[in-house]
Image (cartoon, rainbow, N blue to C red):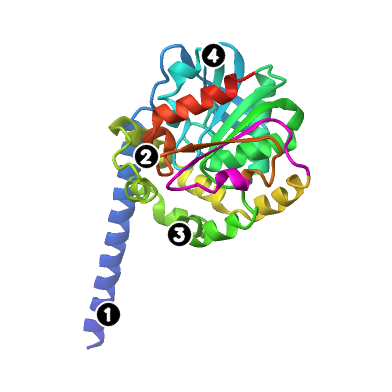
Amino acid sequence: MKITNRILKVTVMLIAFTFYSYTSFSKNIIQTTINKAIKPASPPKGFSNQYAIVNGVKIHYVIGGHGTPLMLVHGFPQNWYMWDRLLPELSKHFTIIAPDLRGVGESGKSQGGYDKKTMAIDLHELAKKLGYKKIDIAGHDIGMMVAYAYAAQFPNEVNKLALLDALIPGVEPVWSQVKAQAWWFGFFSQPHSSEVAEGRMNLILEDFFPAVSFVQNSFTSQEKAEFTRAYSVKGAARASFLCFVFEQDIKDNQEFRKHKLAMPVLAMGSDHFAPFLGAHVRLVASNVKECVITGSGHWIIQEQTGQVQKGLLEFFMEK
């Protein structure tokens, strides 16, 4: 009986070890395939990929066009490529800088620095390195929070600011209301959530994109492939999920909002996801123009490309 029990224990251990090894091996194979088989998306004609070490982290960015510098800041779970549809037209009027935020795609995966104040300093250092003393800036989703932190820290170095379809952490009453409803805020901010998602970001994003869409199937196959690739790079899940730990952002924003932004600010929200945005932004800025993107959920650039392009051009080109 003792021998039988011992054999049983050994057998169970071997099965468990084999399953673990097979799962880990399969996961590594999937990760290797994603990293090597799918190449990063190429920028459009007239644009190039560039890299800079700023604020202690490597930042990848796409740059092109002519005129006043306009920085476009992506959100989660996208990278610079979320702006690709707009780049040909915008670059006729502006020098476009579209970075990958720290932690995403080809940018560095630092251990920390995912509070929006620090991420904004990354971009400010990038602008300085490129020789720009003053820029226009637009941000969507997490990028909207970073763009606000940029303008709040460096108000004299921002001509105009566009905040697209998200909200500012800690600014009530909207913040608590949305945070209570947005299940992904809770999931992504958990300490071990990225361990669950690592190697499975294709499954996470496959469910997440339609969850906050109004116009379904608005992403091209190339866009879905690029966003999945950018967040499947080793370390990207852990890094990008840290963007959802908002405690420091809330503290920083309580200080920032003591001084309302004075530069022209565009609040561009969708009618099906962020209709509150105009009133929300007026709590932190005194010169606000509101633009509601109709027939759209959260992915306004993919769902209503023409409306977004028109709204941005009118705002940034207005004298």
Kind of residue indicated by mark 2: Thr
Query: What segment carries the magenta color?
Result: 259-280
- Per the model, the C-alpha gap separating discs 1 and 2 is 46 Å
Q: Which mark is residue 6?
A: 1
Instruction: Using the numbered discs, state the Cα–Cα distance from disc 3 to disc 1 in whole angstroms.
Output: 46 Å
Residue that numbered label 4 is attached to: 93
Q: Which residue is mark 2?
A: 228
Q: Nearer the viewer, mark 1 or mark 2?
A: 2
Q: Nearer the viewer, mark 4 or mark 1?
A: 4
Q: Is residue 146 above or below residue 87?
A: below
Magenta stretch holds residue 166: no
Gap in Å between the C-alphas at discs 4 and 1?
Answer: 75 Å
Mark 4 vs 1, N-terminal side: 1
Q: Looking at the image, can residue 207 be seen? A: yes
Q: Amino acid at mark 4?
A: His
Give the left or right position of residue 7, taking residue 311 as reference.
left
Image location (x, y in percent) of residue 310: 47, 25
Q: Which residue occupies the foreground of this view, 260 or 139?
A: 260
Crowd band around label 4 with a 10 angstrom C-alpha radius: few (<14), some (14–19), many (20+): some
- Give how far across and how far down residue 199 sits, in percent: 36, 48
User: Can you see residue 109?
Assistant: no
Q: Residues within 10 Å of mark 3 (few under 14, many from 20)?
A: few
Q: Give whichever of discs 1 and 2 has the lower sequence position.
A: 1
Q: Nearer the viewer, residue 5 or 286?
A: 286
Q: Quadrant of the C terminus?
A: top right
Would you place residue 47 above or below residue 72 in this image? Answer: above
Horizontal side of residue 41 vs 8, given as left or right: right
